[in-house]
Image (cartoon, rainbow, N blue to C red):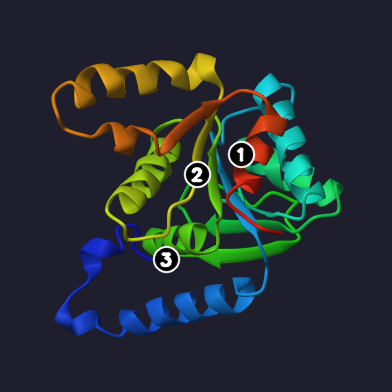
Amino acid sequence: MEKQFLINEFSITESWRIFKIMGEFVDGIEALHDIGPAVSIFGSARIKPDDPIYKKTEMLAALFAKNNFAVITGGGGGVMEAANKGAAEAGGKSIGLNIVLPFEQKPNQYSNLKLEFKYFFIRKVMFVKYAHAYVIMPGGFGTMDELFEAVTLVQTHRIKPLPVILVGSEYWGGLKKWIKSRLLEANMVSSKDIDILKVIDDPEEVVDTVKKFVII
């Protein structure tokens, strides 16, 4: 069984791993370079199909597909499954970027383009490289990791500006309020930085917001 903590295993004697990393980059770019306008949708893998969040994600992904956007997810269960299902059943491109883990994540059945990654950082590059927007459904640490990484890349001008949309004011409203009351007041961020984050409830408004940034 391959060692779990891959980053810690890098050493001069294991430089051959660089070729595996290069291979994953090549595979990802070859598979995704022509998918057209796309959104990356994130959220908890723990959401069940009978949860309103699952249903809302499914509806939102279908709306994106009907508006000619490919939908990219992490390829697992919960919100990821809902997004892939909604996009696929609406006749759109439903892309799952699965990560190999020793536990928890299994690929869902609804992505019609599946890629598998061993390295999180390569997978992260694919999420942001091909996305015209980040859509953040309710989730935990992994979801917030993707959220703040995208905001940081936009803030530091490492990527072109893209909307980062938090779906659900009841879930995310407190986070944005805390950012304003703590980070902004302490001069840790600027008001322009906060504007990168948009909190929206209505799926159609989410799609319309993204369409303003993209000409299909």
Residue 187 is left or right of residue 123, and the answer is left
Judge depth for marks 1 and 3 and give the one in front.
1
User: Could you say which disc has been placed on residue 52 in the image?
Assistant: none
Looking at the picture, which amino acid does disc 2 mark? Pro
Q: Name the residue under label 2.
A: 163
To which quarter of the image does residue 92 belong?
bottom right
SS at mark 2?
loop
In percent of width and height, residue 39 lies at 61, 51
For disc 2, the neighbor class at 10 Å (few under 14, some 14 to 19, many from 20) is many
Looking at the picture, which amino acid does disc 1 mark? Thr
* Most foreground residue, 156 or 50: 156
To which quarter of the image does residue 186 belong?
top left
In percent of width and height, residue 48 lies at 67, 27
Q: Return the disc, 1 or 3, that comes first in the chain's sequence.
A: 3
Q: Return the disc, 2 or 3, that comes first in the chain's sequence.
A: 3
Q: Name the residue under label 1.
A: 209
In percent of width and height, residue 141 lies at 38, 34
Q: Mark 3 points at which residue?
A: 122
Would you say residue 41 is visible in this rendering?
yes
Q: Return the disc, 2 or 1, that comes first in the chain's sequence.
A: 2
Marks 2 and 3 sit apart, C-alpha to C-alpha, by 22 Å
* Most foreground residue, 189 or 12: 189
* Residue drawn 61% across the image and 39% down it: 209
- Quadrant placement of the N terminus: bottom left
* Residue drawn 25% across the image and 16% down it: 181
| Tag 2–tag 1 contact (CB < 8 Å) | yes
* Most foreground residue, 153 or 92: 153
* Residue drawn 30% across the image and 18% down it: 178
Residue 37 against residue 184 in the figure, above or below: below
